[in-house]
Image (tube, rainbow, N blue to C red):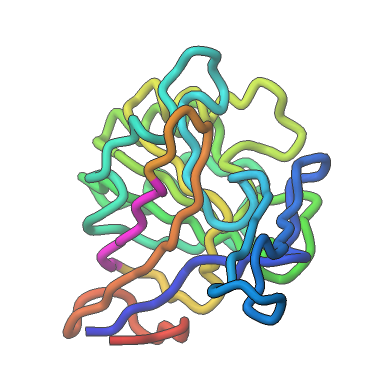
Amino acid sequence: MTLIDISVVTGVGTPEWPGDTPFACGWSARIADGSSVNLTTVTASPHVGTHADAPLHVRDGAAGVEGLPLGAFVGRVVVLGVEGAPRDLGDELLARVPAGTERLLLRTGVSIATGTFPTDWPALGAELARALTAGGLRLLGVDAPSVDRRESKALDVHHALFDGGACVLENLDLRAVAEGEYELIAPPMRWIGVDAAPVRAVLRVQGSKGGKGSKGSKGS
């Protein structure tokens, strides 16, 4: 069994969405200062690094991350590369998605994993999101900072996915992951009343299943 870590390494300096709360880490207790333990304190937007969005992110009064279905984040997943595709992903992408796909990760090649917040990235539209959920999609993940365009204010793709019963993963690190089928293990933290939560996202490859040639961080 091989595990591929597809989470962005998160720490001080990890790019946050412009205007959002950056990651910061300090100490509330230090052994060096006479305490019996070291205790860190962390402040950050839950959208820094790899994370899952909840409907609360785009709708007042909607469910927070504690209401996300755990099963959507665990199970068979398809990884597709869309580098070089049109800025607006459409029917060509839909034709590449295997029938019955419940979890889909899109490798746009545009990610904060490079250390810089990108100015633009390929994204699907609301119509395509609705077509995917109508076909049974339960989760869409992207390596980009959002499933919507950077300039979007309506966040139509978020709404379409949530309306169709699908979940959202953002800020994945898919740079070294080949196209193919894997098992996804990426449950979000069980925080109450929060619009997003950090995720440790992992792909599992067993035997000949899954994409070949993957070069992510591995463990067993």
Q: In x, y percent, where is residue 116? A: 79, 64
Of residues 129 and 32, the one drawn nearer to the viewer in this rendering: 32
From the viewer's perspective, is 111 left or right of 179?
Answer: right
Number of numbered tags placed on the structure image: 0
Q: Is residue 44 above or below residue 15?
A: above
Magenta residues (range) = 181-189
In the image, what residue occupies the spot 62% across and 65% down? Answer: 10
From the viewer's perspective, is 163 left or right of 194?
Answer: left
Q: Is residue 197 above or below residue 127?
A: below
User: Residue 21 is drawn in which quadrant?
Assistant: top right
Q: In x, y percent, where is residue 215? A: 46, 86
From the viewer's perspective, is 57 left or right of 62?
Answer: right
In the image, what residue occupies the spot 61% across and 37% down? Answer: 148
User: Residue 132 is drawn in which quadrant?
Assistant: top left
Is residue 186 magenta-colored? yes
In the image, what residue occupies the spot 64% across and 52% down? Answer: 48
Q: Is residue 169 above or below residue 152?
A: below
* Residue at the far front in the pictured view: 34
**Image quadrant occupied by the C terminus:** bottom left
Whether residue 92 is visible, yes or no, is no
Q: In x, y percent, where is residue 117? A: 77, 57
User: Residue 66 is drawn in which quadrant?
Assistant: top left
Q: In x, y percent, where is residue 68? A: 34, 35
Is residue 106 magenta-colored? no
